[in-house]
Image (cartoon, helix red, strand yellow):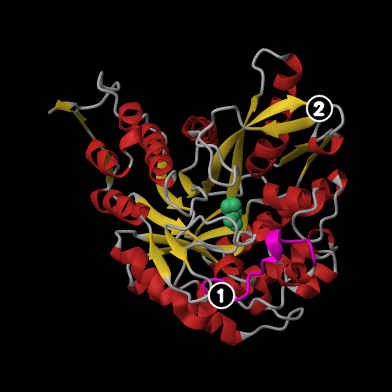
Amino acid sequence: MVRATLSFPSGFLWGAATAAHQVEGDNTNNDWWAWEQEPGRILAGHRSGKACDWWGGRWAEDFDRAAETGQNTHRLSLEWSRIEPSPAVWDDSALDAYRQMLRGALDSGLLPMVTLHHFTHPLWLAEKGAWHSDDIVASFERYTRKVVTALQDLVGFWVTINEPNVLAYGAYAGHDFPPGAGSMPKAVRALRNMALAHAASYRAIHELQPGALVGIAHHIRGFAPAKPGNLLDEQVARLRSRVFNETIPRVLTDGKFSMLGRSERLSGVAGTHDFFGLNYYTVERCSFDLTRPGQLFTRGSFPAGADLSPTGFIANEPDGLARALAWARRFGLPIYVTENGVEDPEDRLRPRYLAAHLRQVWKAVNVGNPVRGYYHWSLVDNFEWERGWTQRFGLWGLDTETQARLRRPSVDFYAEVCRANALSSEMVARYAPEALESLFPSHGPEGLDIERG
Ligand code: IFM
């Protein structure tokens, strides 16, 4: 067999990512908790409930798991509704709890990357319209200032908003997230406000903490024509990509907000990211469909024979990550893969998905793309929004009844990668043998130091 070791640069960050509402449990004061109580909103009627019981203190054992398996960073988020339960009323005990969590991460050797906003809103803000409320930008800046003032001795690595595009589509264009507005113009307005709020937050963080690194975790989904060569399929794939993938990174770079015929310069937004946070999962095939104006005339699918996750949510398309990283490089910023993973309770697909995606990260680094870290989604199975507990993204599984953690083989695979700061053919041979020939072809991929044995 061919033997090769793909080494990463020293100082590369290896971690996992989580989000407050998905792991903490008992987040009763936000719009998602309320949404979960409404019949029909969440698949199988699931609720977040205790989630992974991080608010009960189980973050400590999960951080131990991450650290003991070689991870050196963790991306987590703060729950706005705990910190500001009513407008401008601060709960210092919540901030203290986050201080303990962050101190715990640091003590375990995990550099914290902290997300200020990951999909949820305090109820009082949701009642005012959340991303449509008139004072959302000022509210987000006020929250940012409070948090950064309280936590800046423990954190210097901030994500302002997770996946503005997913939030805008899920909550405003579509019906999956609260408030389920189902209106594209509303999604455009929400996205514009997120760009403005991000910029206000970015400036506030830098004023309080000049050395901080601040960015967004941006979801890039690959869009490809279902029938290559079919002009209409190609056009809708390009349109989806422009609207979904390009709007936010561009406005943060040059201040120009262009979406669906609307184009304007947003003051103060240009140059407000210090790194490119990239969340990547899959590539969707797009077919033109005149009956779907709300979906930009697109029907999405995966090709026949795709290597699909158990619920058919994700196709294993590592080339899409390669393209996303190459595209992100044009912004001239350090890049962090802030999320990547697959739902797979039996851990049948995850090892080869992980191996194939890490190989693409290595290839990008190897051609000089400044990728500085990788965060697997996720550390432990957690509450998957409108899909409830039907999808399991954790390296560790979770028994929601007992809170027991179940160690999946991918834990050990990822631990070997993190500890070695490298992906080797030998690891792939043990954890994902079916992917060995495609990832480490016997004829030897270009640029590799090959040993034959
Ligand atoms: O669980 C989500 C996360 O909250 C945002 N990015 C995608 C993940 C998997 O669906």
The quadrant of the picture showing ligand 1 is bottom right
Looking at numbered disc 1 in the image, what kind of residue is underneath it?
Thr
Image: 58 above or below 228: below
Number of other residues with Cα within 10 Å of mark 2, as a class: few under 14, some 14 to 19, many 20 or more? some
Upstream in the sequence, badge 2 or badge 1?
Answer: 1
Mark 1: secondary structure: helix
Mark-to-mark CA distance, 2 and 1: 50 Å
Image: 265 above or below 25: above
| Residue 49 on the magenta segment | yes
Of labels 2 and 1, the one closer to you: 2
Horizontal side of 242 relative to 332 (left or right) equals right
Identify the residue at the far left of this view: 453
Question: Does the rendering let one see residue 200?
Answer: no
Q: Mark 1 points at which residue?
A: 149
Q: Which of 85 and 270 is in front in this view?
A: 85
Mark 2: secondary structure: loop
Q: Which mark is residue 289?
A: 2
Q: What secondary structure do most residues of the magenta stretch adopt? A: loop
Q: On the rendered image, what quadrant is the C terminus found in?
A: top left
Q: Quadrant of residue 160?
A: bottom right
Q: On the rendered image, what quadrant is the N terminus found in?
A: top left
